[in-house]
Image: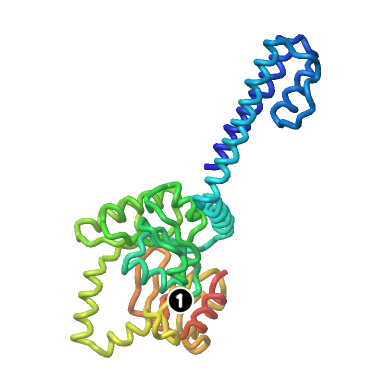
């Protein structure tokens, strides 16, 4: 660390400056200003000559000052040169630039682990126009993943790294490393640092589901279980499975499924028969998550939509966004 090394050099310089001034005052009996002047011109080797005639002891003391000054200069130059040659200067500037960029992030998503699953999650979020910050333990470069806003290298369970990823202002986090233990620990750390963040945690073992939920996961994903269910659906109901793929995959941008938070808006509060949401917004309401957490999947004309509910709809992305903007308070 250049700044740390230069701090030591500056501290040593001040010590030599004070010690030299005191030395001339004690050895030669010079006034403080004369002693300070002699130290300065000696350390800088400007060659002004002696301020006053020196005794033998004073000359020996001055030689020590000269050696100290030359050594201090050589040390400072060598540290600065090493800092540039080793690339620490470029890395330091990149770190400062990255931290300034992180401070401006808000409502972004953090993906911990850029394996096959994590990469798909990050790319899908980016496809939806969202800012994505990834944390990966293996050396990587953000240029390899153009869909990322930023890529940090290190342990995703580290509080320092999560804080650098601006977890306090993040909207969500996906713990998608290769081990259940790491994902659960990341979930626990993230939940403690941001109690309101939405966390989706990957687990491979069924026994880890409850542990992840107790650690603070908002939802738990078993990729093998989901893949198996999807393959079975493709075998038994291929047309329904194709529709589901279109709703959740980025390959079909003209059709998606989305959540709509219902605010206190009179035009969107009341029974479905009077709200006429499908006719007004060209979207289909398929389920309703009530404010108490109950999920209603069978909707009728008398089903009530109230503030705090979450409407689950399918339709074109532009229509879903229009409904979301109109329905929130």
| Residue at 75 percent of width and 13 percent of height | 54
Dot 1 alpha-carbon crowd within 10 angstroms: few under 14, some 14 to 19, many 20 or more: some
Nearest to the observer: residue 65 or residue 123: 65
**Residue 67 at what x, y percent from top left?**
61, 26
225 displayed left or right of 55: left
Compared with 166, 107 (above or below) is: below
The quadrant where residue 4 appears: top right
**Residue 80 at what x, y percent from top left?**
58, 44
Callout 1 secondary element: helix
| Residue at 59 percent of width and 31 percent of height | 71
**Residue 254 at what x, y percent from top left?**
45, 87
| Residue at 59 percent of width and 59 percent of height | 104
124 displayed left or right of 328: left
Q: Which residue position holds label 1?
A: 127
Model colouring: rainbow
Instruction: Count the marks.
Output: 1
| Residue at 52 percent of width and 87 percent of height | 280
72 displayed left or right of 298: right
292 displayed left or right of 270: left
Nearest to the observer: residue 311 or residue 251: 251
Quarter of the rendering occupied by the C terminus:
bottom right
Nearest to the observer: residue 260 or residue 252: 252
């Amino acid at each position: 660390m250049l700044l740390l090394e230069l701090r030591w050099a500056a501290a040593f310089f001040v010590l030599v400056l004070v010690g030299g001034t005191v030395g001339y005052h004690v050895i030669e009996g010079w006034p403080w200003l004369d002693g300070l002047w002699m130290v300065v011109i000696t350390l800088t080797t400007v060659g002004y000559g002696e301020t006053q005639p020196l005794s033998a002891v004073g000359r020996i003391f001055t030689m020590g000052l000269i050696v100290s000054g030359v050594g201090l200069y050589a040390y400072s130059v060598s540290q600065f040169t090493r800092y540039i040659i080793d690339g620490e200067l470029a890395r330091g500037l990149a770190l400062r630039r990255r931290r300034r960029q992180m401070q401006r992030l808000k409502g972004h998503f953090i993906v911990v682990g850029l394996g096959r699953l994590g990469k798909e999650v990050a790319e899908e979020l980016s496809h939806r126009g969202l800012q994505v910050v990834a944390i990966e333990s293996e050396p990587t470069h953000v240029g390899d993943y153009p869909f990322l806003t930023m890529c940090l290298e290190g342990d995703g369970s580290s509080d320092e790294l999560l804080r650098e990823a601006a977890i306090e202002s993040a909207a969500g986090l996906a713990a998608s490393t290769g081990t259940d233990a790491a994902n659960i620990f990341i979930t626990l750390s993230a939940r403690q640092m941001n109690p309101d963040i939405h966390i989706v945690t990957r687990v491979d073992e069924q026994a880890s589901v409850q542990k992840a939920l107790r650690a603070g996961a908002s939802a738990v994903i078993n990729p093998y279980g989901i893949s198996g269910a999807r393959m079975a659906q493709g075998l038994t109901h291929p047309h329904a499975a194709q529709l589901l793929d279109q709703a959740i995959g980025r390959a079909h941008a003209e059709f998606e499924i989305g959540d709509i938070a219902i605010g206190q808006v009179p035009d969107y509060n009341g029974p479905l028969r009077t709200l006429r949401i499908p006719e007004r917004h060209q979207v289909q309401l398929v389920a309703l998550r009530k404010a108490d957490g109950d999920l209603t999947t069978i909707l009728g004309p008398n089903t009530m939509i109230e503030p705090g509910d979450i409407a689950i709809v399918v339709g074109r992305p532009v229509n879903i966004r229009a409904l979301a903007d109109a329905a929130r308070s």
